């Protein structure tokens, strides 16, 4: 032994190592020889217990469990040696038949690698299939979980992992099959109950406010504004117990001054759901005599304190649905040749403008001539004007939300704006 001071101990080597790369299912490994009882066997760096192999013929090592392809099997064989007199006297060499006892008596401590996994668990890493993952199974052992099918996601039930199909998205909005046939129509204020509906059944609540009364006493009078509309969509449980208020129309005027706009119809959820107020007043912007016909028309309601307003083009973010409206509908009975708006009929100095969901506008008087009131597809039509003849009253609007027509001169009075209503549809 190079560099050793004094007499070299005999023998110079006390162990011999051999390594083998296993083929699939291999159990027998032919060594260059060993002394029976003086050989240790390692698989992939982990020492095997005596029960995991047989080494009794001085040449072959036979595994109890076949190795996997590319497992590394290593043998360490020990040669007999003559200990010094002091060591022989102290231990009497009575322990050489037991490798572990020998190590203890010789003061040799093997390092603790902290590996407690079994060979079977470690072999889970070998040739693992693409996409598989390792996890702890119900027995607390390492196991493989094969990849899921295309489009699935890894989920947990709180105990185990599995792959599952992606959950469905939000429910599609279901439109009422016939707006002319609501499940409920309310003409006076009250409290709404879902009745026999399940909590998760969907409903539409359709609010129409009161129409504006007509003017009078002039040869040139603009028409007046139909009641605004608002449609709310959501689960019955969010609306249950909510209070609705039906907006009243305003009386016609005996002067050329503007009557007040019709009152808004509203729906207020319970405190459990944020005391959220939905109102047709949201549809009225700017000055009282020029409300915007492109006003808020649809709302979705998805829970406590969550109101998600949309416009009549697309929903505002954050949103649950988009409502996309194209060219206004034409061709229904009562429609005039004037402009048609998705919400309510706007005031004009000609023929009354049409609304689709809100009330029609009241008819104007232009150069003494009478003008028709605007129509409405789903709400009330506006009343016609009388012309400027003396003591000729304007025609009242039609429920819900039709505006009153202009009246003539003298003691004439504009037509009354119609009251609104509240309609509910189970979808």
Image (cartoon, grey):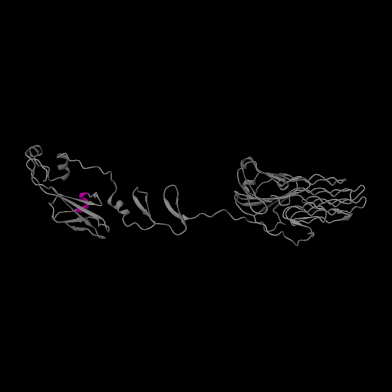
Residue 186 visible to the viewer: no
Image side of residue 217 versus residue 320, left or right: right
Q: Please tell me whether residue 315 is drawn above or below residue 107 in the rendered image.
A: below
Residue 24 appears in which quarter of the rendering?
A: bottom left
User: Residue reaching furthest bottom?
Assistant: 331
Residue at 28%, 49% in the rendered image = 118
State yes or no: residue 52 in magenta.
yes
Q: Magenta span: helix, strand or loop, mainly?
A: helix
Q: Give the range drawn in magenta.
A: 49-53
Pick the quarter of the image with the C terminus: bottom right
Spot occupied by residue 378 in the image (x, y as percentages of width and height): 74, 56
Spot occupied by residue 326 in the image (x, y as percentages of width and height): 68, 59
Residue at 21%, 53% in the rendered image = 74
Spot occupied by residue 333 in the image (x, y as percentages of width and height): 78, 61
- Figure label count: 0
Q: Nearer the viewer, residue 143 or 227?
A: 227
Residue 113 visible to the viewer: yes
Residue 23 appears in which quarter of the rendering?
A: bottom left
Image side of residue 264 versus residue 122, left or right: right
Spot occupied by residue 216 in the image (x, y as percentages of width and height): 87, 48
């Amino acid at each position: 032994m190079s560099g050793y001071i004094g007499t070299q101990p005999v023998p110079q080597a006390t162990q011999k190592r051999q390594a083998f790369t296993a083929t699939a299912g291999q159990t027998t490994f032919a060594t260059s020889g060993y002394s029976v009882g003086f050989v240790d066997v390692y698989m992939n760096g982990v020492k095997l217990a005596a029960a995991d192999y047989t080494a009794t013929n001085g040449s072959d090592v036979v595994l109890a469990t076949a190795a996997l392809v590319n497992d590394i099997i290593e043998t360490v064989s020990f040669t007999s040696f003559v200990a010094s007199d002091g060591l022989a006297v102290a231990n009497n060499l009575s322990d050489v038949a037991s490798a572990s006892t020998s190590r203890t008596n010789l003061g040799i401590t093997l390092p603790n690698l902290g590996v407690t996994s079994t060979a079977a668990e470690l072999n889970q890493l070998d040739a693992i299939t693409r996409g598989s993952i390792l996890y702890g199974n119900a027995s607390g052992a390492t196991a493989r979980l094969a990849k899921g099918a295309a489009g699935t996601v890894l989920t947990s039930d709180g105990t185990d992992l599995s792959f599952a199909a992606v959950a469905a998205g939000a429910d599609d909005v279901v439109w009422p099959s016939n707006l002319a046939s609501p499940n409920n129509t309310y003409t006076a204020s009250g409290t709404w109950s879902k009745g026999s509906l399940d909590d998760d059944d969907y409903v539409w609540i359709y609010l129409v406010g009161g129409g504006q009364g007509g003017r009078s006493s002039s040869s040139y009078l603009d028409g007046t504004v139909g009641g605004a509309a608002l449609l709310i969509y959501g689960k019955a449980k969010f609306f249950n117990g909510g209070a609705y208020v039906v907006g009243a129309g305003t009386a016609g005027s005996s002067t050329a001054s503007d009557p007040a706009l019709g009152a808004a119809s509203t729906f207020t959820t319970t405190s459990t759901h944020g005391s959220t107020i939905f109102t047709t007043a949201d549809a009225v912007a700017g000055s009282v005599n020029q409300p915007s016909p492109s006003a808020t028309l649809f709302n979705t309601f998805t829970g406590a304190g969550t109101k998600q307003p949309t416009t009549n083009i697309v929903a505002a973010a954050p949103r649950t649905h988009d409502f996309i409206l194209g060219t206004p509908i034409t061709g229904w009975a009562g429609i005039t040749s004037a402009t048609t708006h998705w919400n309510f009929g706007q005031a004009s100095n000609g023929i009354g403008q049409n609304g689709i969901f809100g009330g029609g506008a009241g008819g104007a008087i232009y150069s003494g001539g009478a003008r028709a009131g605007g129509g409405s597809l789903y709400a009330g039509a506006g009343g016609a004007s009388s012309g400027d003849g003396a003591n000729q009253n304007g025609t009242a609007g039609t429920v819900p939300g039709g505006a009153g027509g202009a009246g003539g001169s003298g003691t004439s009075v504009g037509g009354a704006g119609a009251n609104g209503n509240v309609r509910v549809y189970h979808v």
